[in-house]
Image: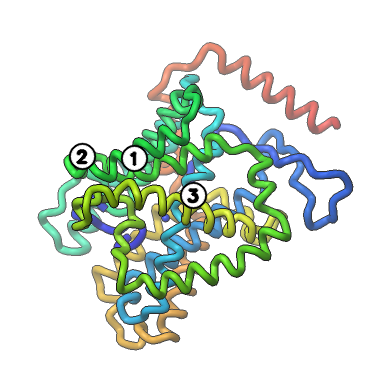
């Protein structure tokens, strides 16, 4: 992404399956039908709200990436780009943290972390590096697992965040500590590009916030009053984005650099971390308020957002490498709309079941040959099957 995930040399907005399904908040007594909270989920059932949120967020990611080559010709498009990049990755990361609440060092969960995050990182970091080397005719592009390129930084960050989840769950004030870490990162240019640690540190508070959230917190954002209030909030954000386009460096939203690397005084780093955290949370809350709570035609696609996230980058980069965005008509209003719709269609197709079945070998490999069987796993499987039978009999 020369986008929310722009290329930064080798340094450059879905998610692996949750460790435990989240249950919906209890509904108030006799609520209207359209305001009922989703019932508690069991077994393999999923909360439609979160799948809807993930799909809509990946849609915004793909649209934003498609705007990157065009936005320089349109201040309005650049304003929309700025607003989208203020909240789409925070929304993803908050959901990721929320579904990581049950993570511990249990062997089966460590295996899922390796097969669902680390292995896809190795596969796609290699694939993207080779794609740039040969697709862009860049012989200097080497494969480096220590220097994520383009989209793969998120997998590195998610691996580190989830691995440190037990620590954050044991701290008395995890969110203030995470904000402190992010602020220190924003004034530390010597961190360098290894593992894209600036992003790991500066996006950390959103993951920790997700760990701290409960179903009732999401329920409070899913009210009629919040949905109505979100309209003027987004209108004001778009107006501010239009005003800020020539006045603000959009690289602040990428969280990939220290303040000094952006040519700003060191003290602006902590200030911008806090300011962007507040703005991102406000826009994310408005976004969640608009997410449908019922099952829709795109709810099932929410289970495949990591596929859409990692695969759509090849299409966007192919457009850069082969000049698809160079046609003059694409840089007018109708062309921008066409590109936006095309990006939405592509990422939607990449989240579908056939694509997931095709690429499951890389995204969700079993790898039973690589791990010793946990002695307690058969007992857990029997207990899970018993719970499913009891639920089916209710």
Q: x and y percent of residue 13 in the render?
A: 42, 55
Locate the C terminus by quadrant: top right
What residue does disc 2 label? 191
Q: Nearer the viewer, mark 3 or mark 1?
A: 1
Q: Earlier in the sequence, mark 3 or mark 2?
A: 3
Percent x, y for residue 156?
34, 40
Q: Position of residue 359 (x, y in %)?
A: 44, 48
Q: Taking 141 as reference, is 63 above or below it?
A: below
Q: Is residue 185 left or right of residue 204?
A: left
- The residue sitting at 17% across, 40% down in the picture is 190
Label 2: how many residues lie within 10 Å, few (<14), some (14-19) or many (20+)? some
Which residue is disc 3 drawn over? 92
Judge by depth and name the residue closer to the eye, 104 or 242: 242
Which quadrant of the figure has residue 146?
top left
Q: Which residue is at a point 67% across and 62% down the rendered structure image?
A: 227
- Image coloring type: rainbow
Q: In the rendered image of this protein, does residue 343 appear above or below residue 54?
A: below
Query: Contact (CB < 8 A) between labels 1 and 2?
Result: yes
Q: Nearer the viewer, residue 22 or 246?
A: 246
> Residue 136 vs residue 203: left or right?
left
In what element is the residue under mark 2?
helix
Viewer-proximal residue among 329 and 90? 90
Residue closer to the observer: 361 or 223: 223
The x, y position of residue 21, in whole percent, is 63, 36
Residue tagged 1: 201
Q: Residue at x 57, y 59 (%)?
A: 287
Name the element at disc 1: helix
Residue density around tag 1, few if under 14, some if 14–19, many if 20 or more, within 10 Å: many
């Amino acid at each position: 992404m020369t986008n929310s995930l722009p290329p930064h040399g080798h340094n450059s907005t879905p998610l692996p399956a949750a460790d435990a399904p989240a249950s919906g908040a209890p509904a108030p007594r006799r609520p209207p039908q359209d305001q009922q909270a989703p019932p508690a989920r069991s077994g393999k059932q999923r909360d439609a709200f979160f799948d809807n949120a993930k799909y809509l967020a990946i849609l915004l990611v793909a649209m934003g990436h498609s705007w990157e080559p065009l936005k320089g010709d349109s201040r309005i498009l650049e304003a929309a780009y700025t607003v989208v990049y203020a909240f789409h990755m925070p929304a993803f990361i908050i959901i990721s943290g929320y579904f990581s609440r049950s993570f511990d060092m249990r062997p089966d969960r460590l295996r899922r972390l390796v097969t669902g995050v680390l292995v896809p990182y190795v596969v796609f970091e290699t694939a993207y590096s080779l794609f740039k080397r040969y697709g862009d005719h860049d012989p200097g592009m080497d494969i480096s697992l220590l220097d994520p390129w383009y989209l793969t930084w998120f997998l590195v960050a998610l691996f580190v965040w989830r691995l440190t989840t037990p620590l954050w769950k044991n701290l008395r004030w995890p969110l203030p500590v995470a904000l402190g870490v992010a602020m220190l990162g924003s004034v530390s240019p010597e961190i360098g590009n290894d593992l894209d640690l600036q992003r790991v540190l500066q996006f950390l508070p959103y993951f920790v916030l997700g760990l701290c959230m409960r179903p009732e917190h999401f329920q409070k954002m899913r009210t009629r009053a919040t949905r109505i209030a979100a309209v003027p909030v987004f209108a004001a954000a778009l107006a501010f984005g239009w005003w800020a386009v020539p006045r603000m460096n959009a690289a602040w939203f990428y969280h990939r650099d220290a303040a000094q690397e952006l040519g700003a005084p060191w003290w602006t780093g902590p200030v911008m971390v806090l300011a962007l955290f507040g703005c991102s949370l406000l826009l994310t809350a408005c976004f969640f308020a608009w997410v449908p709570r019922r099952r829709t035609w795109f709810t099932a696609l929410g289970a495949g957002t990591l596929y859409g996230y990692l695969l759509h980058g090849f299409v966007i980069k192919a457009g850069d490498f082969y000049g698809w965005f160079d046609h003059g008509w694409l840089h007018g209003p109708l062309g921008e709309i066409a590109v936006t719709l095309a990006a939405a269609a592509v990422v939607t197709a990449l989240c579908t079941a056939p694509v997931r079945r095709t690429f499951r070998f890389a995204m969700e490999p079993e790898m039973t040959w690589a791990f010793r069987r946990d002695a307690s796993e058969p007992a857990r499987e029997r207990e899970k099957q018993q719970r499913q039978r009891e639920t089916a009999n209710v």
